Image (cartoon, rainbow, N blue to C red):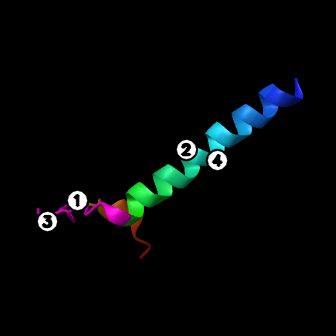
Amino acid sequence: MFRVSIVVLVVLLAGVIGGAVFLATCEIPAPSAPVEKVISDEKFPN
C-alpha cells in the first residue's frame, strides 16, 4: 500500500509540474474581439 501511494503521489506531482511548465511556456493569445454586454438599468441604484 505504501508503494502504491508513492507512485500516485509521484504521478500527481509530475502532472502538476508538467501543467505549470506548459502554462508558463506556451503562448496563449489574448482575445482580440471586443466583448459587449448589455446591463439592464435595474442593476444600478438610483
Residue linked to disc 4: 13
Is 16 on the left or on the right of 2, as rendered?
Answer: left
Look at discs 1 and 2 and give the one toward the viewer: 2
Q: Name the residue under label 3.
A: 34
- Work out whether mark 4 precedes mark 1 in sequence or the reverse, and give the earlier one: 4
Residues at marks 2 and 4 touching, judged by CB atoms closer than 8 Å:
yes
What type is the residue that disc 2 sits on? Gly
Sequence-wise, which precedes: disc 3 or disc 2? Answer: 2
Which portion, as a residue range, is magenta? Answer: 25-37
Which one is earlier in the sequence, the residue at label 1 or at label 2? Answer: 2
Question: Mark 1 packing: few (<14 Cα in 10 Å), some, or many (20+)?
Answer: few
Seen at 63% across and 38% down, the residue is 11
Q: Give the alpha-carbon distance from disc 3 to disc 2, as whole Å.
A: 34 Å
Q: Name the residue under label 2.
A: 15
Does the magenta portion include 6? no
Looking at this view, is 32 or 23 the one in front?
A: 23
Residue 25 lies, with reference to residue 10, above or below; the image says below
Q: Quarter holding the C terminus?
A: bottom left
* Residue beneath disc 1: 37
Outermost left residue: 33
Q: Quadrant of the N terminus?
A: top right
* Separation of marks 4 and 3 at Cα, in angstroms: 38 Å
Amino acid type at circle 1 is: Lys
From this view, report whether residue 44 is shown above or below residue 13.
Answer: below
> In what element is the residue under mark 3?
loop
Q: Position of residue 29 (x, y in %)?
A: 20, 63
